[in-house]
Image (cartoon, helix red, strand yellow):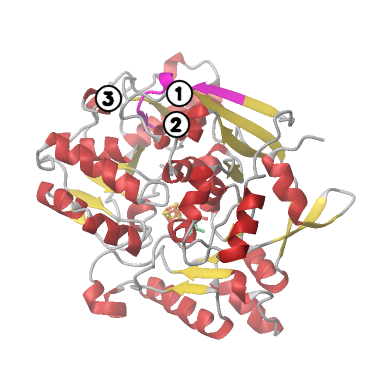
């Protein structure tokens, strides 16, 4: 029987299935960060259990790490809770072990969803888990990657398995060619705009079609990263030559005969031509306009040529109420052209858009516009996703372009994506952000977030307000 990519990886990892469909799934890779692991380690400790397979664990500190003041070392972490989470991870890994650990300030430290692929910890065909919802990112490699909760983190540590029910199969097919300046971020925002934040609930989404195939691995990661914002716990892209080339030579990737065997298997990781999907959604890539969210949920999104929606035009009372609430929080008037929205801060970073390609896209816009950050911008910051991204960007001189224009060039971490460290919006501040969530208070209490691509964020920093990036691409 023809199978989808999801079916194939699932079948390969199921240990046991109960009558009600609850399955025990073997987990190949466990990514760990400082926020969702402390109670899990504590649970192991209290029950006297060991880690089932230490070699499956790859850990880093990312959410709480500061993006400035590294010369002060751990003393630079001003918030006591942040500091405790980071040092607790250090001591837990020292006690329980890991295949690789990239602690605070080490060269390979970074956002867990950036460092996993970067180090070859994420490989095609694997089951990957992490106590973090954006684990869906790793699906870009044809890996089945689930975000899990803290109690599940402990369960995986103790048993190397996860209890899960199989989801349904959805194919999101994006065919055609993107306009210049339109990126992977715009694709995924357009998808969420179409299916809604609950559209993928109960499904694993496979992203396919010529527009997805033509994306780089970085772009595919951006798309899969936001599968969770479309309601799906996991997103997937089939393996192709780009996947294999990206993985080749990474520190944790197989070598020699094992590499050849792995590649032969990885080449089978695609949906069979006649495989059945429970739902299919199609988008025409050539019609995707650079996207901006105007509200407080990623589905509240429109093209940059659009206007802030008018709640009075919405017939459904609950949707009307949601629009009204969002506009009041965002302090936006119905009918205002999205391109006329001025911002106070610009954040280029997060596990959605902090990889080298994102840095390059943003720097290219800054270089092309050839001007400084606009006067109304209080802070424009670029936060690379990892130490390696930072190093590569600096090798290419991208940091000089940013700094010369007045951007701050920071140390890697989650940063203002969720404001667990010192980087945040003040109440009422408006931000062009390349992250993935625009919830109320996400970037700081009372802060207002507009999700955009790196190119759009960079252009907003220079212009002070949004512009249609296609006009300069
Ligand atoms: C802190 C962590 C548990 C959380 C998540 O699960 O996604 C964070 O990464 C986020 O993006 O909100
Ligand atoms: S960058 Fe943002 S979305 Fe990604 S893991 Fe960190 S906090 Fe979560």
What x and y, as percent, mark residue 253?
53, 63
Question: Which residue is label 3 attached to?
Answer: 470
Question: Which residue is label 1 attached to?
Answer: 285
Q: Nearer the viewer, residue 433 or 31?
A: 31
In the image, the segment drawn in magenta is 281-295
Q: Nearer the viewer, residue 114 or 381?
A: 114
What x and y, as percent, mark residue 400?
14, 53
- Residue 346 shows up from this direction: yes
Gap between marks 3 and 1 measured at Cα: 14 Å
Along the horizontal axis of the image, is 271 left or right of 239? right
Quadrant containing the C terminus is: top left
Question: Which residue is label 2 attached to?
Answer: 187
Q: Nearer the viewer, residue 458 or 415?
A: 458
Indicate which disc, 2 or 3, sits on the residue closer to the N terminus. 2
Residue 366 image-quadrant placement:
top left
What x and y, as percent, mark residue 427?
28, 48
Q: Nearer the viewer, residue 468 or 391?
A: 391
Disc 1 secondary structure class: helix
Indicate which disc, 1 or 2, sits on the residue closer to the N terminus. 2
Gap between marks 1 and 2 measured at Cα: 7 Å
Judged by depth in the image, the label closer to the viewer, 1 or 2, is 1
Along the horizontal axis of the image, is 353 left or right of 460? right
What x and y, as percent, mark residue 341?
24, 30
């Amino acid at each position: 029987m023809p199978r989808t990519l999801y079916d194939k990886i699932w079948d390969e990892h199921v240990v046991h299935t109960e009558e009600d469909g609850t399955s025990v799934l073997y987990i190949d890779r466990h990514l760990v960060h400082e926020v969702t692991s402390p109670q899990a380690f504590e649970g192991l400790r209290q029950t006297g259990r060991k880690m089932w397979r230490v070699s499956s664990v790859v850990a880093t500190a990312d959410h709480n790490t500061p993006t400035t003041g590294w010369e002060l070392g751990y003393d630079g972490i001003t918030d006591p809770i942040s500091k405790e989470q980071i040092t607790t991870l250090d001591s837990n890994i020292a006690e329980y072990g890991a295949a690789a650990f990239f602690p605070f300030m080490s060269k390979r430290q970074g956002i867990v969803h950036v460092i996993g692929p970067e180090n070859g910890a994420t490989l095609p065909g694997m089951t990957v888990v992490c106590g973090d919802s954006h684990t869906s990112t790793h699906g870009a490699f044809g890996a089945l990657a689930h975000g899990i909760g803290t109690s599940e983190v402990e369960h995986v540590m103790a048993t190397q398995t996860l209890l899960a029910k199989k989801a349904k199969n959805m194919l999101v097919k994006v065919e055609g060619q993107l306009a210049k300046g339109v990126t992977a971020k715009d694709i995924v925002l357009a998808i969420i705009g179409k299916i809604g934040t609950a559209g993928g609930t109960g499904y694993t989404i496979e992203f396919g079609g010529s527009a997805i195939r033509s994306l780089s691995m970085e772009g595919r990661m951006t798309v899969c990263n936001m599968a969770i914002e479309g309601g799906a716990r996991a997103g997937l892209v089939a393996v192709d030559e780009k996947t294999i080339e990206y993985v080749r030579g990474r520190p944790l990737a197989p070598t020699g005969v094992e590499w050849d065997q792995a590649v032969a298997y990885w080449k089978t990781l695609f949906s069979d031509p006649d495989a059945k999907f429970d739902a299919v959604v199609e988008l025409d890539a050539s019609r995707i306009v650079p996207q901006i969210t105007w509200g407080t949920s990623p589905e509240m999104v429109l093209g940059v040529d659009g206007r802030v929606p008018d709640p009075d035009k919405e017939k459904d009372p609950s949707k009307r109420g949601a629009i009204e609430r969002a506009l009041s929080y965002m302090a936006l008037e119905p009918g205002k052209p999205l391109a006329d929205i001025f911002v106070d801060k610009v954040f280029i970073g997060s596990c959605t858009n902090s990889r080298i390609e994102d840095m390059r896209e943003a720097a290219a816009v800054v270089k092309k516009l050839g001007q400084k950050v606009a006067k109304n911008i209080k802070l424009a910051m670029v936060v690379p996703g990892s130490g390696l991204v930072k190093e590569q960007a600096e090798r290419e001189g991208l940091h000089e372009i940013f700094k010369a224009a007045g951007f701050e060039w920071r140390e890697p971490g989650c940063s203002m994506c969720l404001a667990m460290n010192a980087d945040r919006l003040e109440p009422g501040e408006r931000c062009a952000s390349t992250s993935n969530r625009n919830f109320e208070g996400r970037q700081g209490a009372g802060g207002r977030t507009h999700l955009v691509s790196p190119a759009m964020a960079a252009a907003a920093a220079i212009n002070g307000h949004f512009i249609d990036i296609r006009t300069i691409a």
